[in-house]
Image: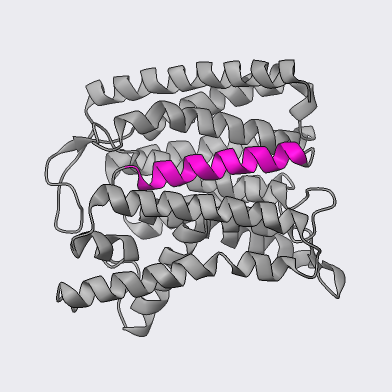
Amino acid sequence: MTLAAILHHLAFAAGLAVLSAAVVRLMIAVRVMDRPDPRKAHTLPTPKGGGVGVVVAFLVGVAVLYRFAAFARLADPYFRGVIEASVAIAVVAFLDDLKDWNFSVKLIAQILAALVAVASGIYVHDYSVPYVGTLPIGWLGPPLTVAWIVFATNAMNFIDGLNGLAGGVSLIAAVGLCFLAATHDGWFAYAASLMLAAGLIGFLPFNFPRARIFLGDVGSQFCGFMLAVLGVVASRFEGVALSFLLVPMLLSGVLFDVAFTLVRRALAGERLTLPHRGHLYQVAQRSGVPTAVVALVHWAFAVFGFVCCLLFVAASSSLRPYVAALTLLPQMTWLGFVAERARRARIERWG
């Protein structure tokens, strides 16, 4: 790709960021409010739905991409699947912001949106396993892909509890994936990640360090969903065995927090669908760690994940699982730190 092309793409992304910011300002004026309650960190009613700006910028970008950018086009069924699935999850999540549906309704809607993407052919067909080779997974591909998309969507939704946390992590992950895709000729993933990043750049100044508006479910679910779908697209990067691990590495902090919390609550016999304040980032904030610091720690996790991705693609296939495992080191350190902070603050019940 030429320097002129890169500058052209960045100029287009800047325009999308401005569009996103304008829509976010409109949503602040509309004032769909997020009311405080005991499980939330904020104490004053605050507008939500800032993710509408991210969604609008992304969909406008995708429309332009479909019409003009042939270099980044997927085969038409796949491309339409991405568009239809992104619209589906955005509409469902925005209605959730308005109606505050219970978890079972949201889960069904997320599964249906994931099925839209999978039905277009966007699913993992095989895994390249070191020492084994290519391992076809046949009929398991679609259900495993749906499970991944739904888990990542909810993980980003669950982590969206502090100013700048979900938005910042999503931005870093999108920029990282954009770079990785460009270096491996994954032009659709490159363009889509760039547009998602542009939308988040327009939103984040309104949310961090002081929140004038929250992402809302429309933003957090959309970001998680699109990054998960793009992770499936990234699994087809040419010449990169195990490339399905790239997005999980970028989102390692989010995925670890949610997975650990689900396992901990399940072992404690708690109902997993009930609202709570037991995520690691929430316990850290409750124990006295400043909100901005918690967000910045998670941004650092995403940056570390990107560094691991760079090492991953440079490593031999046999070493790549060990490089991916490196992302667990800061998570275990963070877990120990939060546990000690909770002990000192005498927080006996994490949920």
Q: State the residue in front, 310 or 168.
A: 310
| Residue placed furthest toward the left | 44
276 with respect to 217 (left or right) = left
Q: Position of residue 78 (x, y in %)?
A: 73, 39
**Quarter containing the N terminus:** top right
The quarter of the picture where residue 75 lies is top right
Judge whether residue 277 can be spotted in this image: no
- Identify the main secondary structure in magenta: helix
Q: State the residue in front, 36 or 238.
A: 238
Q: Is residue 68 above or below residue 309?
A: above
Q: Is residue 275 above or below residue 34?
A: below
26 with respect to 92 (left or right) = left
Residue depicted at x 73% and y 20%: 3
**Quarter containing the C terminus:** bottom left
Residue 194 highlighted magenta (yes or no): no
Residue depicted at x 28% and y 66%: 274
Residue depicted at x 31% and y 41%: 97
Judge whether residue 69 can be spotted in this image: yes
Q: Position of residue 284 (x, y in %)?
A: 27, 63
Residue depicted at x 64% and y 65%: 324
Q: Which residues are magenta?
A: 164-183
Q: State the residue in front, 347 or 91.
A: 347
Task: Report the number of numbered marks.
Answer: 0
